Amino acid sequence: MNEGKISLSDALKVMDERERNGKPLPFAIKFVERNGAFVDLKNCVRVGLRQDLHDKGYIGIRILKSAEHVIPAHIRTITKFNGKQIFLG
């Protein structure tokens, strides 16, 4: 009955999935920045992040066609993943 929705824990698991060759699977994500602005990213992957930010609940996101710039996102501010609404569960 959660069609169009995905739990945060499942979304985090999917972010870590990889292709057979080891490359991460791209995804789309929408989250809220600290200043309240929404960020909507497509064709991105989860990457490593500084330990201090990781310990505070952040994940690192990189857009595949961009340079190596890593965008930090707090997991509790993720609102959509691959077009599905996030719910806590």
Image: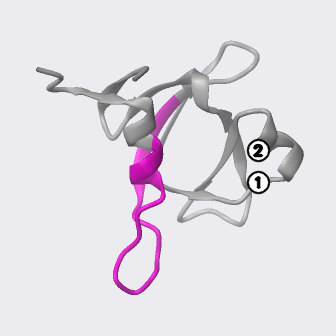
Direction from residue 64 to residue 72 in the image, left or right: right
The residue shown at (20%, 26%) is 4
Give the vertical position of 49 relative to 6 (above or below). below
Q: What residue do we see at 40% from left, 41% from top? A: 11
In the shown orientation, is residue 6 left or right of residue 61?
Answer: left
- Which stretch appears magenta? 12-30
Q: Could you say which quadrant of the image residue 57 lies in?
A: top right
* Quadrant where the N terminus is found in the figure: top left
Q: Residue at position x 85%, y 51% from top?
A: 51
Mark 1, secondary structure of its residue: loop
- Amino acid residing under circle 2: His
- How many neighbours does mark 1 have within 10 angstroms: few (below 14), some (14-19), or many (20 or more)? some
Q: Is residue 49 left or right of residue 21?
A: right
Using the image as rendered, state which of residue 34 and residue 21 is in the foreground: 21
Mark 1 and mark 2 residues within 8 Å of each other at the beta carbon:
yes
Residue 60 spot, x, y in % from top left: 67, 50
Compared to residue 87, the image places residue 69 above or below, namely below
Earlier-in-chain disc, 1 versus 2: 1
- Residue at 71% in and 60% down: 48
Q: Is residue 83 left or right of residue 78?
A: left
Residue 13 rendering spot, x and y as whole percentages: 43, 50
Local packing at callout 2 (Cα closer than 10 Å; few below 14, some 14-19, many 20+) is some
- Residue 61 position, x and y percent, is 62, 50
Classify mark 2: helix, strand or loop.
helix
Q: Which mark is residue 89?
A: none
Residue picked out by circle 1: 49
Numbered badge on residue 54: 2
